[in-house]
Amino acid sequence: MPTVSVKRDLLFQALGRTYTDEEFDELCFEFGLELDEITSEKEIISKEQGNVKAAGASDVVLYKIDVPANRYDLLCLEGLVRGLQVFKERIKAPVYKRVMPDGKIQKLIITEETAKIRPFAVAAVLRNIKFTKDRYDSFIELQEKLHQNICRKRALVAIGTHDLDTLSGPFTYTAKRPSDIKFKPLNKTKEYTACELMNIYKTDNHLKHYLHIIENKPLYPVIYDSNGVVLSMPPIINGDHSRITVNTRNIFIECTGTDFTKAKIVLDIIVTMFSEYCENQFTVEAAEVVFPNGKSYTFPELAYRKEMVRADLINKKVGIRETPENLAKLLTRMYLKSEVIGDGNQIEIEIPPTRADIIHACDIVEDAAIAYGYNNIQMTLPKTYTIANQFPLNKLTELLRYDMAAAGFTEVLTFALCSQEDIADKLGLDISATKAVHISNPKTAEFQVARTTLLPGLLKTIAANRKMPLPLKLFEISDIVIKDSNTDVGAKNYRHLCAVYYNKNPGFEIIHGLLDRIMQLLDVPPGEDKGGYVIKASEGPAFFPGRCAEIFARGQSVGKLGVLHPDVITKFELTMPCSSLEINIGPFL
Amino acid sequence: MEHQAVVGAVKSLQALGEVIEAELRSTKRWELTAEGEEIAREGSHEARVFRSIPPEGLAQSELMRLPSGKVGFSKAMSNKWIRVDKSAADGPRVFRVVDSMEDEVQRRLQLVQGGQAEKLGEKERSELRKRKLLAEVTLKTYWVSKGSAFSTSISKQETELSPEMISSGSWRDRPFKPYNFLAHGVLPDSGHLHPLLKVRSQFRQIFLEMGFTEMPTDNFIESSFWNFDALFQPQQHPARDQHDTFFLRDPAEALQLPMDYVQRVKRTHSQGGYGSQGYKYTWKLDEARKNLLRTHTTSASARALYRLAQKKPFTPVKYFSIDRVFRNETLDATHLAEFHQIEGVVADHGLTLGHLMGILREFFTKLGITQLRFKPAYNPYTEPSMEVFSYHQGLKKWVEVGNSGVFRPEMLLPMGLPENVSVIAWGLSLERPTMIKYGINNIRDLVGHKVNLQMVYDSPLCRLDAEPRPPPTQEAA
């Protein structure tokens, strides 16, 4: 969930009233936002870098507000204020207009070289804008928020904003060999080639995260003006030449990307948010983008879409009984201008370009419910009549757990993920023999594989509890995972029961007795015949030679028991003899 | 008579019950140590050194050989009774400085010996004690009087009833030693269930009481398709990032997917349909095939709903599951790479948001949570969505206790569920309510091999709707 940080006083000024922290928190809650933290720049710096660094920092109160991940229109002060003011019916939602310029339209021509790396671009112009320091900061911050969220850290879309008065169109969006791109980037004093820049930015804490997007490509995307001035090298950095300042009056905005839909949404959000400060409020100057196939399109789209939803559908989905007129009013408060039409039960809803999150009637239903107030909805119980059933494997597990504890064993709960070492080396096995599933991106060795046996978890539990009085009698009933090409995903869970006895003597007879008890509980009699169980001398690298037996029940091998090999005991950092039992309980269902 | 013998006798009379009453009175007095006695008799070491020096002086080496030499020499020096001439012909020589002196130490010790310790000041006594010449001894004395059961003939109390006493009837005439009811009993040897799994059992019980059927969740490995795509979670969604999800190297890809259904999912993502605009991006089968460790049990719910959709005609269901899920997250005191998710699902015709809230109220009431409120939220696969908050008495604020919503039509309709069927669902983690319940701040104290078994041994029954014990001194997370 993105967090937007706004100055409290600026927010209240824009909202036209003040709130106590509690009142504002309540308003946020109702609207689906969360007032996450009340802080100041000074407090933030002092928390992160200490009081000394914080001295002199601003102590203007900041509200940190959590915004739902799909509400890109609430990612800046301007949008938040507009949303809340419309919600509180203090203003009407503005109508955003795209206009053609008086003179020549700004043109961005895409060449075919971009196809393999970053094929889409859209553009627009904000004319006669008036920034202040706060507005300018908000403009920059919104781009950063969009980059981090909908743009997926610039991988899907990257935004460039430029002082149009320093440039001369038409603009060309192309891709070139990195050694052939040379320009002075933002915040540098001289020109560098793209190769040099990529090296320099390897140590830049902010930019290094974006380098991978183009790093290994033969051609890098780049935008030029008609004089060969570099506007930007998306998605990494803009040129210094066209940098915007507080005094910039005309802004050329370009968004390049790999996702055309998202590029259009991002452009719409930026221009709808900041056209508020243009001389002609909420009016955006169009730009033309010519694609390599020769087709040309005009942006921003600023499309208004009409949806039709029946009032009784909204009432039925939410569980309320409101008149169509009231529902239309509720939706209008959510920035969705609505009116009752037709037979008096149809509501026509206008989806503005700021609400790209509305893609289905269910999104409209939710907004009606939010405006109605979730906590005003009458709670009722569904009439759904059903008979409950347990999942048989879990039912058996529950029953066995209680009787294992009744047999004097204590239940532990260990992790399903572990290191290769735990399930292989430490048990004297080769990892390939375990048929374990392997994780491709573990952050540490603890998460290399899914366990193929419960034993390592139990032994690690003992190792962490060596101070406890002996004997230790532990068990776990849980799933292990084995590769299996007969299943749709290629792996399968098995429900295992594992128990260990740890004491000054190996206590094989105790673990053996536990097996007898488990079989008694499962109603499996001793004996070789089909319904019975026997144990037969066996071997295994985890067991002491001659002290291991395989367990056969109902005609199949279900597991092993025995005295653990001293090497295993040592590798798990234990010192006492130990016997163990591990069976698959699936066959006893 | 030996003092200790008297004390012993008093104690054994006391053990007989109320035969005597003995009031303990202890007194303190000062006594000389062995060395103190010697000094009281023969003078302090420094005095003895002084006296052994003739007018013509004594070689220092010779003086040091005297029994009191070392201690006496330095004390006599600091008292300025003697001096050393280092320039003497045959080595340093010691001479008297004064003609006579007062042996204060001996005098004080003699006072103590004479029972007049109180004549010495606190400072003087402690100085002598430091020199180990004086010691304070505590003397225990009893003030003994007749008890309520006083008798001049005593009989020993029996400790326990024996079979012989029962058969002979001798228990009738014997006094029995009283029990100390303040002592603890002997805990029975027993096995124990893990506290988190005790809570899991209670949650299962609650769902079963509410008529919910348990879904199979015994597949930790899941394809991206069932984990994300089937839930209408777009392929560029941040949750599908390497940073958040454990992907598999082996087996890297799912072998089979229900291809008809996959096609419908693909179309809904990339072009829309079922009344949806879709996400309008290029949906890739390769991405859907990628195997992972499931990030939520909602993947199992999706499979269950898909199976339900294949059964005609549609029958309403209530489903639940509680099982492990996995996240490739940054670990801290409340986050582990694996945790348990609790999920409830109801599918029926005409379910409303009011129904969802009503069922949540019943569910949380069974957990002992009655003060609820609902906040609008965003989840990729539910719309409307609501976070569930409850008022935490300890923390004095509203805390999130669960997440819920109505599954999106873009998820349900491609499965083949009828259009007028709604599916409401909610989820929460098993660990968080358990940590609050047991007042545990660090999740590692609850889950995994590092837990303290004593905690498992000592954990009480899990009764979710009962008033919790006031939390321990530490503050809840």
Image (cartoon, rainbow, N blue to C red):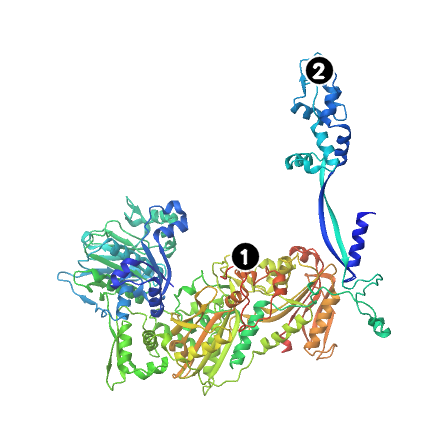
Choose between A329 and B328: the one closer to the eye. Answer: A329
Choose between A70 and B31: the one closer to the eye. Answer: B31
Q: Position of residue B458 (x, y in %)?
A: 62, 65
Please name the amino acid that badge 1 sits on.
Ala
Please name the amino acid that badge 2 sits on.
Gly
Q: How many marks?
A: 2
Helix, strand, or loop for circle 1?
Answer: helix
Q: Can you identify the residue that label 1 sits on?
A: A445
Q: From this view, report whether residue B82 is shown above or below residue B396.
A: above
Looking at this rendering, what residue extends furthest in the bottom direction?
A: B313
In the drawing, does residue A557 fall left or right of residue B361? right
Q: Position of residue A492 (x, y in %)?
A: 56, 71
Q: Position of residue A167 (x, y in %)?
A: 20, 53
Q: Position of residue A364 (x, y in %)?
A: 32, 76
Q: Can you identify the residue that label 2 sits on?
A: B91
Looking at this rendering, what residue extends furthest in the left direction?
A: A102
The alpha-carbon separation of the residues under discs 1 and 2 comes to 76 Å
Chain at numbered mark 1 = A
Please rate how many residues cluster around mark 2, counting C-alpha atoms within 10 Å: few if below 14, some from 14 to 19, many from 20. few
Looking at this rendering, what residue extends furthest in the top direction?
A: B89
In the drawing, does residue A96 fall left or right of residue A488? left
